[in-house]
Every structure is written in structure tokens, then in C-alpha cells.
Image: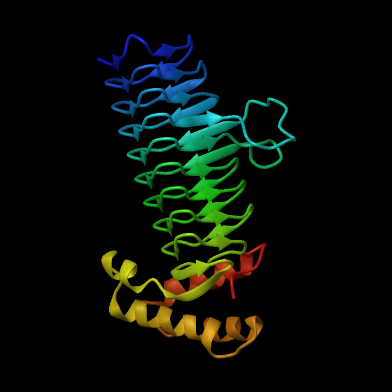
Amino acid sequence: MSRIHPTAVIEPGAQLGEDVEIGPYAIIGANVKIGARTSVGSHSVIEGHTTIGVDNRIGHYANVGGRPQDMKYQGEPTRLEIGDRNTIREFTTIHTGTVQDGGVTTVGNDNWVMAYVHIGHDCHVGNHVILSSNAQMAGHVIVGDWAIIGGMSGVHQFVKIGEHSMLGGASALVQDIPPFVIAAGNKAEPHGINVEGLRRRGFSADAISALRSAYRLLYKNGLSLEDAKTQLADLASAGGDGDEHVRKLIAFIETSQRGIIR
């Protein structure tokens, strides 16, 4: 049985799964679908064409599925899709997409989104991501799995944040962070490989050593980006545990649109 507070407003057409909990004065829009066992805190607004999976926890005063903050938006039925087992804390804002992009904003599974975070239109957040309090992401940002964004940080539109990377607190990010890299500062600069995070996630010593070597090629040896990519390709064929991860690093660099921090 769903537990809906008598002061909550559930608009006709909203679809609620089993054991959904809706707190006092929350508003659930007509085009919203909420999966089983998800809870919505008091005074939160879930609106727009929004689909939320199972076992999510949405805190008080959150706004999920709001209109994109894009002056070109003309009321098109763009979407927000949120996966399973996410924690989305109080005063977070997550907006739907725009037709100028794919028309959808996505948040994956098992993410930890702290208070006052903003996820702008057409962003794509992967799985197991941590967004610390007051992290602010402009539109069209892509965040890879297991990435961490520090509190009070700002991310420029169209920036990509690679998997297993980390952006330090109070940073300003205007270019892409490659996978596995730690960055911080205003403007954000590289500060090594996220070794501790990789160890916690079961990366072997050989894989971490290969990524450290890759970082030296990319940032420490005085090579041009093209020369670094050539040597990275050689490193990726060394035959060790790190080959796959170095290939991911190369692929990220080659597909970067804004250029990587360097």
C-alpha cells in the first residue's frame, strides 16, 4: 500500500508503484511515473514527463522534472529519466531535456546526490556517482560511472567528466576530465590519478600502475597531446591488467569536444 500524506497533491494521470511514500505538501504531476518503494519528502515537486525507478529516496523541497532553464524551450514534452536506488537530498533541482539535444535528462542507478545540487537540462549522470552539496552542473554535461564532484563546484555546459574521476570542492570545470584523473582548482587542473578510489573499487596494482604511467605521458613528460596519444597507444598494448583502462582513456581523449584539462 502506498503511503500518501493527506496534504499531498497527486494529479490525475500520475502513476505510483507499490509502497511509494509521498510526504506532506508534496506535488506529483500528471505525467510522472514513480517506481515501487520510492519515497518523496515533504514539499517536494515532481513534475514534467518524469520517470523514476524503484527504491529511490527524494528529500524535502526537491524539484525534480522542472522546465529546463533554456530560453529556447517552448514547452515541448521533453523528459527526465531516473533509475533505481538513488538518494536525492533536499533542495536538489533536476530538469528535463530540450529538443536541441536528445530531449531527455538521465540519472542512472545508485547515485548519491547531496543537498542543493543542480543537474541541468540534457545532462547524463551515470551510476554510483557522488555529487556533493551545492555542486552545480550546466546543461548537456555527461558524468561517467563512479565519478565524484566536490561541493560548491561549477561545471560548464557540454563538459564530460570521465569514469572514476574526481573533481575537488569549490572548483570551476570548463574542459573535460579524463577517466581516473583527479582535478581541482579555478580553473580546474589535473592532480594525479584517483588511486585511492580505484583501490577501493578493486583495481589491481598492475592496472593502477599502468594508469599512473598513462598520466605521466599525458601530463608530466612534456609531450604534445598527439605525441602523448601515440605513446598511450603503445602502453595500451602492454599485455597487462591496465590495457583496457588505458584504451578507455585514449577513447575519451579522442572523442572530447571541449578538450581535456591539461
- Residue at the image position 52 percent from the left and 43 percent from the top: 119
Q: Position of residue 4 (x, y in %)?
A: 31, 14
Residue 21 falls left or right of residue 74? left
Q: Is residue 190 above or below residue 156?
A: below
Instruction: Find residue 28 and report its image quarter.
Output: top left
- Residue at the image position 42 percent from the left and 29 percent from the top: 61
Q: Position of residue 17 (x, y in %)?
A: 34, 21
- Check the picture and name the quadrant holding the N terminus: top left
Is any part of residue 237 visible from this angle?
no
Q: Is residue 219 above or below residue 174?
A: below
State the residue in front, 133 or 28: 133
- Check the picture and name the quadrant holding the C terminus: bottom right
Is any part of residue 130 visible from this angle?
yes
The single residue placed furthest to the left in the displayed view is 1
State the residue in front, 155 or 47: 155
Q: Position of residue 124 (x, y in %)?
A: 53, 47
- Residue at the image position 42 percent from the left and 58 percent from the top: 147
State the residue in front, 13 or 154: 154
State the colouring used for the structure image: rainbow
- Residue at the image position 58 percent from the left and 64 percent from the top: 176
Q: How many numbered tags mark residues here? A: 0
State the residue in front, 86 or 58: 58
Instruction: Find residue 70 and report its image quarter.
Output: top right
